Amino acid sequence: MSEERITEQIYMTPTPVRIWHWLNALGIVTLCVTGIQIRFPEYANIFGTYKAAIKLHDVAGITVSISFLLWIFYYLFVARSLVKLYIPNVDDIKRGLFSQAFFYFFYYFLGQKNPHIATPDNKFNAIQKISYLLIMFLFLPLVIVSGLLLMNIAPLRGWIIAIGGIKFLVDAHYLIACSFFAFLCVHIYMATLGHTPFSHLRQMWTGWEETEPHPRWR
Amino acid sequence: MKRFLTILSAALLPPLMALSADAANDCLTCHSQKTIMNRGIHLYIDPLKYGLTTHARIGCVSCHNNITKRHPKDKVRPSRAQCKDCHAAVYAEYSHSMHGKYAGCTDCHTPHTVKPLLAVSGRDINIQCAKCHQYASTVKSHSKWLPQATLHIDALPCITCHTGSQNYVISMYMVKKVSGSALGGVALAGFEDLLPFLSTGAKVGTLIDLDGDGAISLSELKKFNTSGKYSSIALLGTMMPEVVTHNFDILDNRRDCTFCHASGPNAQQASALLFPEPDGTYSRMAVEKGAILDILYGTPDFYMTGFTRSNTLSIIGAVIAFGGLLVPILHGTLRFFTRNRRKEL
């Protein structure tokens, strides 16, 4: 008698997080594209005028900054799951990090299963936790602060000089932005590594994730 | 004949100028006394400021040519030369400009204190404009279309946009931190602010021009910018027009941000440093080409978006971005070739 295998629908991502995610995604893509025109105006004229690119960059930057604050507020005071979801535990660092890396770069190609099974309380594997921790609590705050300073150079000139000058600020902003682009490439690609190429994407849109087929008794 | 006159005037000019200077000394005997202001404030001539003008070289009587030896007892009101007598081309250009009917030459340039363009800072130039164009209203009118209007108006001389010059030179000038400012404000540094850093009798240029060759190399600039000794002083930059025309128009092409914010790292690398002198003027020293494009320490406090970006940094950023792209490319390729293994799941 063959074993019956089923799939389940799990509500993984609540609505506020999904709204934040897509707002943030739109904002960061806009920032990357306008940023290219701002840095390389003689090669890229995507939005007609330079001024249009600057204004759009500013609006997208403020949108991402506000949505970041709302994201922190939601996870800290409403869902109260920030630490549980995003801070790697000892086991994540000792074991999860390596087993996940081996899976992505070796066992995946041999057809083995993902060692991490996502649940609403443990959504992210060790690599995701560390990546998101760096992105959300180091890179994003740095790019937001440097961006806000660059939007207010005249009134904050003294502060800008004190932290190393406007070039340091611009260079940091640009390099972090490039890192965001690199992250975006990896993030979008990794999102296709689910049960089906679109299962993670659908989950981030509807909130519901379809699990991999498993025996009924699991 | 013309050639003969040219040679003659060239030969006569220095002695005439010397005579004029002597005559000026005679005039200043009375007109440099502050007590003369009791008869009219305009009669006082500050000898220090006047001495720095180009007009001092041609002397008082060149413009006030009806002065006699009996002045002022002769009760003859001194004549005044018209600016156009010497500055005909500038006068013609200015009088046809939109400013021509609202302000005369002396509304902006006091002939007894006017300094040559190269001896003033960008901020000083704007003082002339601010006599009519109040700072707040200027910021307000520019804010309607110009992003970061306050930054542009603070950082640039008005003539950078409102004259027809096509080429520019980056001028760096020194600012000092203003203590007690909540947001960490800065103000133009004068000679007295630099005195604590100077050894007795040393010229202000020696603060950066360490080898005394009259030019600033990139390594000298980096040394100054990274030295903790000068942490209260910073170098800001501004774009100065190479040629100043007197049309002072509203030029539509300046509303296109890419007029200044494009053309990339291979264009317009000429820069100079302005040192404040004890007499209130500025001395100018050329800076090695490439300083404004240095990643960090050439001009740490001067950057123009799009225009002064560093090529090296652009490449480092591109490598980071391409590194991100490599993951899906390499992983995706292997994923494609091993797809059959995952079908068994």
Image (spheres, grey):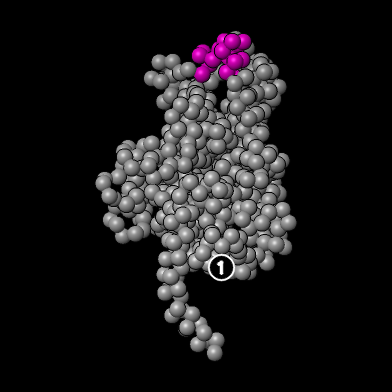
Furthest residue in direction bottom, as rendered: B1
Residue B187 visible, this orientation: yes
Image position, residue B243 (x, y; %): 56, 62
The amino acid on which the numbered mark 1 sits, given as a three-letter code, is: Asn
- Horizontally, residue A183 falls left or right of residue B107, namely left
Going 61% across and 15% down the picture, which residue do you hit? A74
Picture layout, residue B1 above or below residue A105: below
- Horizontally, residue A43 falls left or right of residue B16, namely right
Image position, residue B277 (x, y; %): 39, 50
Quadrant in the picture for the C terminus of chain B: top right
Image position, residue B310 (x, y; %): 47, 50
Furthest residue in direction left, as rendered: B200
* Residue B186 vs residue B313, the one in the foreground: B186
Asked if residue A12 is among those painted magenta in the image, a careful observer would answer no
Asked if residue A76 is among those painted magenta in the image, a careful observer would answer yes
Residue A213 visible, this orientation: no
* Residue B23 vs residue B275, the one in the foreground: B23
Image position, residue B71 (x, y; %): 52, 62
- Residue B23 figure quarter: bottom left
Quadrant in the picture for the N terminus of chain B: bottom right
Range drawn in magenta:
A71-86
Q: Which residue is the site of mark 1?
A: B65
